[in-house]
Image (cartoon, helix red, strand yellow):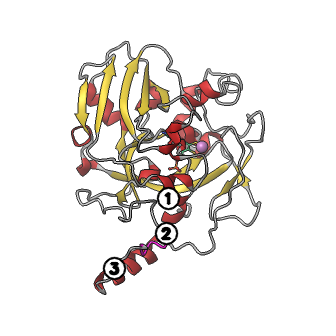
């Protein structure tokens, strides 16, 4: 994010989800073995299309979902920020094939009763997943609409019984330079770390996602579990989490450590507070804009009714 890039995804020939699923079934029924996937793109070195989530009999949560048109699966899985796999937008899908998201454990530490190392299935009940169609607004002034599959972070936190000293929650991504080629260079101070206030973490909009479009997350999207905080810039939504820590002090965060004048702890989407090097007033919706066309950015990314009360007494120009 420090180096401004102008990579533009080709959206004209992108296949919508329904069509590629049909095409996939057709190819399956024809008994064809596909090395180049019917997805039209290859997923790095992993040839496997993502598994359907068999356990999940999920419903869309209409109260917390936008009715705006969703981005296509291809948009969502080929235009990513995941610096562990490189800085380019296509690096994550091209370079994440060696990443192994299963088995997966999460270390729970700090100001919390139920400390320990949990298997992902013990932390997340895959039978309670729901779909949330959220806007994701990147600090780089582009956005997408993504149908996540996940559960409220609050439901996980409640089970873990944080103590009254727990004022903040912090998160860490795995450090695996053998599987994450971007970690061989010190683009950021690995592992990637992020944090929220306890009130933000407990807000019903905050979810842990394990899938999108009804399928397991692909590696480039943060497999097997990632945070989604839809009213904040995308960099708060940390991917491939293997540690959750409860603490009294405000946690350090990767982008704030890298450039504190550009990326604050709060990182609430705010069209009125510009990034020092560009305006945040407008955004480009990936896959849906003619060259250069932009739409206005909404305060709190449009989620103000749910979250504005959290920042009632906060100067948002100072605490950006
Ligand atoms: N571990 C980790 N998490 C990360 C990032 C990253 O580089 N590493 N990039 C962030 C940024 S800047 C954005 S915009 C979102 C992008 O999520 P997406 O690629 O699923 O759209 O992931 C966030 N989470
Ligand atoms: Mo971002």
Residue in view at x 68 percent, y 60 percent: 8
State the extent of the magenta-drawn residues as a range. Answer: 37-41
CA gap, disc 2 and disc 3:
16 Å
* Position of the N terminus by quadrant: top right
For the question of whether residue 2 can be seen, the reply is yes
Q: Mark 1: give few (<14), some (14-19) or many (20+) Cα within 10 Å.
A: many
Q: Is residue 48 above or below residue 128?
A: below
Label 2 or label 3, whichever lies nearer to me, is 2
Residues under labels 2 and 1: Cα distance?
A: 10 Å
Q: Is residue 38 magenta?
A: yes
Q: Position of residue 87 (x, y in %)?
A: 60, 46
| Mark 3 closeness class: few <14, some 14–19, many ≥20 residues within 10 Å | few
- Secondary structure, mark 1, is helix
**Mark 1 vs ligand 1: CB under 8 Å?**
no
Q: Picture quarter containing residue 318?
A: top right
Identify the residue position indicated by label 1 in the image: 77
The residue that label 2 is drawn on is 41
Image coordinates of residue 115 in percent, x first then y, are: 25, 22
Dot 2 or dot 3, earlier in sequence: 3
Describe residue 67's horizontal placement relative to residue 31 as left or right.
right
In percent of width and height, residue 133 lies at: 47, 55
């Amino acid at each position: 994010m420090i180096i401004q890039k102008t990579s533009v995804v080709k959206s004209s020939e992108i296949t919508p989800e329904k069509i590629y699923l049909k095409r996939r079934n057709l190819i399956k029924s024809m008994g064809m073995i596909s090395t180049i996937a019917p997805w039209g793109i290859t997923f790095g070195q992993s040839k496997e299309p993502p598994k359907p989530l068999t356990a999940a009999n999920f419903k869309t949560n209409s109260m917390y979902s936008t009715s705006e048109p969703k981005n296509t699966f291809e948009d969502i899985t080929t235009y990513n920020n995941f610096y562990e796999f490189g800085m380019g937008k296509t690096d994550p899908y091209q370079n994440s094939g060696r990443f192994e998201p299963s088995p997966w454990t999460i270390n729970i530490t700090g100001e919390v009763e139920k400390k320990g190392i949990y298997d992902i299935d013990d932390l997340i009940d895959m039978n309670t997943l729901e779909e949330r169609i959220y806007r994701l607004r990147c600090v780089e002034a582009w956005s997408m609409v993504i149908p996540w599959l996940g559960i409220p972070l609050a439901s996980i936190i409640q089970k873990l019984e944080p103590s009254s000293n727990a004022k903040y929650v912090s998160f860490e991504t795995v450090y695996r330079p053998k599987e994450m080629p971007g970690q061989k260079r010190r683009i950021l101070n690995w592992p990637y770390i992020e944090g929220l206030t306890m009130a933000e973490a407990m807000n019903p909009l905050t979810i842990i996602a394990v899938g999108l479009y009804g399928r397991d997350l692909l590696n480039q999207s943060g497999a097997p579990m990632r945070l989604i905080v839809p009213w904040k810039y995308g960099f708060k939504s940390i991917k491939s989490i293997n540690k959750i820590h409860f603490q009294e002090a405000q946690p350090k965060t990767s982008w704030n450590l890298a450039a504190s004048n550009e990326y604050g702890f709060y990182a609430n989407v705010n069209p009125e507070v510009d990034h020092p090097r560009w305006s945040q007033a407008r955004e480009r919706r990936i896959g849906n804009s003619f060259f250069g066309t932009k739409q206005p950015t909404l305060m709190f990314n449009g989620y103000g009714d749910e979250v504005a009360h959290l920042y009632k007494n906060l100067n948002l120009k100072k605490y950006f």
